[in-house]
């Protein structure tokens, strides 16, 4: 019998943080994401807005596209998104259309986060949890922007 590894939310958020670090190394805003289905990462992504010269190339958008391609369907039911920063309104809309089951994010986005809008942008069945490894995610963002200001 094959042994199935069971990974924690923290494990998957650390994988998203690795993606965020890759973004920082490319001089992109350090946001990373992974999408998980049945304890397996099916998509990894990070911001590519500068490289692609595309304002929609957020980590979540890249991950949604990769996950949909992987499973061969447009809906991401039974999937969980781990993302280092609270999704913006654009990403929340795309995640709603994807019908993803669960979103776990790290740092709050007090400026552009979808939860600020006070409207229900996420799919009604999507479970949303924030604050996982928020200090690590916020530190990546803060150090990135401090370097930019110098």
Image (cartoon, rainbow, N blue to C red):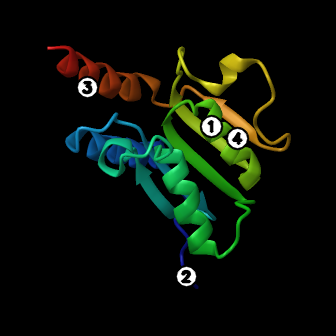
Q: Is residue 113 above or below residue 80?
A: above
Q: Residue furthest bottom?
A: 1
**Which residue sits furthest left?**
150
How many other residues sit within 10 Å of disc 2, few (<14), some (14-19) or many (≥20)? few
What is the C-alpha distance between the residues marked 1 and 2?
40 Å
In this rendering, position of residue 46 left or right of residue 65: left
**Label whose residue precedes the other's in the sequence (4 or 2):** 2
**Residue 42, horizontal then vertical, whole percent:** 52, 65
Q: In which quarter of the image is the C terminus?
A: top left
Helix or strand or loop: what does disc 3 sit on? helix
Q: Assess whether mark 4 and mark 1 are in contact (beta carbons under 8 angstroms).
A: yes
Q: What element carries label 4?
A: helix
The dot on residue 93 is 4
> Which mark sits nearer the N-terminus, 1 or 2?
2
Q: Distance between the residues labelled 1 and 4?
A: 5 Å
CA distance for labels 4 and 2: 38 Å
**Which residue, given by chain and number where applicable, does mark 2 sit on?**
2
* Residue matched to label 3: 144
* Residue 46 x, y percent position in the rendering: 40, 47
Residue wearing tag 1 = 90
Question: Mark 1, residues whose alpha carbon is within 10 Å: few (<14), some, or many (≥20)?
Answer: some
Image coordinates of residue 53 in percent, x first then y, are 36, 46
């Amino acid at each position: 019998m094959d042994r199935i590894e069971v990974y924690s939310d923290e494990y998957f958020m650390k994988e998203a943080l690795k993606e965020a670090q890759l973004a920082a190394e490319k001089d992109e805003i350090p946001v990373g994401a992974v999408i998980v289905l049945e304890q397996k990462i099916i998509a990894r992504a990070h911001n590519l807005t500068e490289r692609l010269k595309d304002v929609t190339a957020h980590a979540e958008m890249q991950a949604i596209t990769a996950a949909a391609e992987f499973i061969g369907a447009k809906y991401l039911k039974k999937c969980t998104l781990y993302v280092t920063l609270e999704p913006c309104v654009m990403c929340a809309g795309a995640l709603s259309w994807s019908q993803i089951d669960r979103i776990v994010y790290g740092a709050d986005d007090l400026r552009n986060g979808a939860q600020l809008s006070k409207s229900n942008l996420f799919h009604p069945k999507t479970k949303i949890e924030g604050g996982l490894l928020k200090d690590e995610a916020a530190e990546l963002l803060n150090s990135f922007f401090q370097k930019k200001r110098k």
